[in-house]
Amino acid sequence: MDHSRLNLEELDGIKLLRKRIRSADIPSSSLDETLNLCTWNIRHWGQKRRQRFSLHCIAEIFFQFDLIAVTELRRNVSELKYVLDLLGPYWKAVFSDYTTDAGGNKERIAFVYDSRAVKFTGLAAETDGPRKKIDRRGNTSQRSIGGGNRIWRRFALGTLILCCWLRIFNGARRAAAKRNLRNWRNG
């Protein structure tokens, strides 16, 4: 990974991050034997410009996995492209369109993957369930699915994002929210 744009202090930060990653005991990925998956909600990614060093740290963490489901990716995906460039030519991304209503915050879901380990088959879909604002915070839901091949086996990967705040889901409201989610899922 090319960190040549970083200064010495930032390079020390990358060394520290690598040390912490090693101590986390993340299983190593073997291209023909395992598939390391990760989900990561990177808050408001693409809304405000992040520091270059932060993007290098994100790339270092992504590099530990074969497939990463990223949530809260905003309309601007230029920083995701920068991270993909850092990771190298084998790294790709598939992402949904962004949610356009006020409750959706122009967010999208991305699947970032090492194309040596995962091959995107072209199947991608998104469904948006009914959205209803409950109070000033509201609630949102979004589902996406992507299909892929993992050398010896086909798979479908899905994400389900539910944003709900417990203080508004109590009693009858909580039961109604569960019922609505169940009906939407079974839909």
Image (cartoon, rainbow, N blue to C red):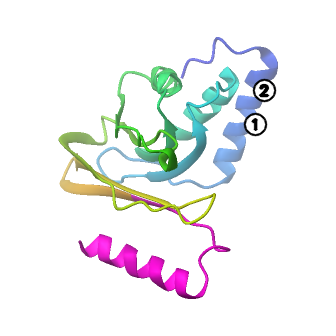
* Residue at 64% over, 28% down: 48
Q: Amino acid at mark 2?
A: Asp
In the rendering, which numbered label is found on residue 55?
Answer: none
How far apart in space, not on screen, are marks 2 and 1 (Cα)? 6 Å
Span highlighted in magenta in the image: 160-187
Residue 141 quadrant? bottom left
User: Helix or strand or loop: what does disc 1 sit on?
Assistant: helix
Position in image of residue 23 (x %, y %): 69, 52
Side (left or right) of 16 relative to 56: right
What residue does disc 2 label? 12
183 falls in the magenta region: yes
**Is residue 59 visible from the viewing direction of this image?**
yes
Q: Amino acid at mark 1?
A: Leu
| Residue 165, position as x, y percentages in the image | 62, 68
Q: Can you give x and y, in whole percent of width and height, for residue 44 in the image?
A: 60, 39
Quadrant holding the C terminus: bottom left
Residue 46 located within the stretch drawn in magenta = no
Residue depicted at x 37% and y 36%: 114
Residues at marks 2 and 1 touching, judged by CB atoms closer than 8 Å: yes
Q: Nearer the viewer, residue 126 or 118?
A: 126
The extreme bottom residue here reads 171
Along the horizontal axis of the image, is 126 left or right of 180? left
User: Can the viewer see residue 63 in this picture?
Assistant: no
Determine whether 33 is above or below 169 in the image: above
Which residue lies at the image location 33% right of the left edge and 44% below the top edge? 31
User: In the rendering, which numbered label is found on residue 16?
Assistant: 1
Tell me where residue 151 appears, x and y as whole percent.
Answer: 21, 47
